[in-house]
Image (cartoon, rainbow, N blue to C red):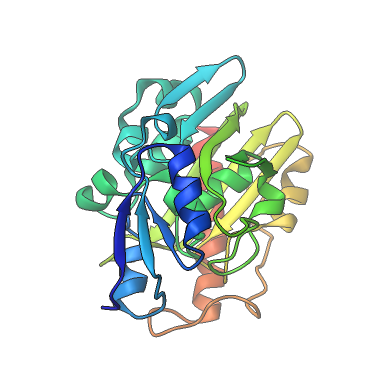
Amino acid sequence: MHQFSYLKAKSLADAAALAKANPEAKLMSGGMTLLPTLKQGLAQPSHLIDIGGLKELSGIEVKGDVLSIGAVTRHYDVASSAAVAKAIPALSYLANQIGDPQVRNRGTIGGSVANNDPAADYPSAVLALNATIVTDRREIAADDFFQGMFATALEEGEIVVRIVFPLPKRAAYEKFPHPASGYAMAGVFIAETAAGVRVAVTGAGPGVFRWSDAEKALAGGLKAGALDALTVDATDLNEDFHATREYRANLVQVMGKRALQKLLA
């Protein structure tokens, strides 16, 4: 593995200062996405700035009609939170499906969103629920945040502080997990929000994306069989030794139908 220096931030302000002083550094909370990229040589930072222990970036709070989750909150904490389970049950379910117990006890929601791994679960919830990513500099709408494989709107040294989810009327998530890693080969999150139905797909393409055809099909009402006639264009989907583009397109259809069935139930 590439050599680097390890720095442990004492506060959010300290983390920002360390990132500014070391332009080639990478921020780390749980490291569940970053560490594999280091091992594969896909990232070669000069420093790792550990922000995982910062209390000001942790915590779960429901206030009014929004759910706020601190960036370094572990997947396990989201999955086991009574507040999350009451406010957005689908998000609680999603968090409990991530990876395995080891990953859920180390990985964080902020790290997952900031890295935008194309097979990560959280980006589908963030996009479908029309969440806001709050950083140490600004607020970014979900539709503007995700910009392709491992790419986001974050600027150099910008730190995700928390994710703010508007509470939906109802929502559901279903995925087909890779049998070894638990990553989504295709996952579909359907949310009935105050602004209408939003449907997000993860795992199937180079990055999370909204399934516009499904949104149009559900705009007239959430009804059983509303997605049955849809097909998914496989042209721009991922293809590897795990699955062809056509197979992933089929998975999107199946997971979408299952998510709708769960939502209606």
Quarter where residue 77 is shown: top left
Residue extending farthest front:
21
Q: Quadrant of the N terminus?
A: bottom left
Q: Nearer the viewer, residue 131 or 209?
A: 131
Quarter where residue 79 is shown: top left
Q: Residue at x 50, y 47 (%)?
A: 16
Q: Position of residue 70 (x, y in %)?
A: 45, 34
Q: Residue at x 49, y 39 (%)?
A: 13
> Quick check: 205 left or right of 223?
left
Residue extending farthest top:
64
Q: Is residue 37 visible?
A: yes
How many numbered callouts? 0
Q: Nearer the viewer, residue 17 or 264?
A: 17
132 in relation to 7, above or below:
above
Q: Nearer the viewer, residue 188 or 64?
A: 64
Q: Position of residue 160 (x, y in %)?
A: 52, 44
> Quick check: 41 left or right of 261?
left
Q: Residue at x 65, y 53 (%)?
A: 145
Residue extending farthest bottom:
241
Q: Position of residue 10 (x, y in %)?
A: 35, 39
Q: Is residue 187 visible?
A: no
192 in relation to 215, above or below:
above
Q: Position of residue 93 (x, y in %)?
A: 39, 38
259 in relation to 70, above or below:
below
Q: Nearer the viewer, residue 87 or 155?
A: 155
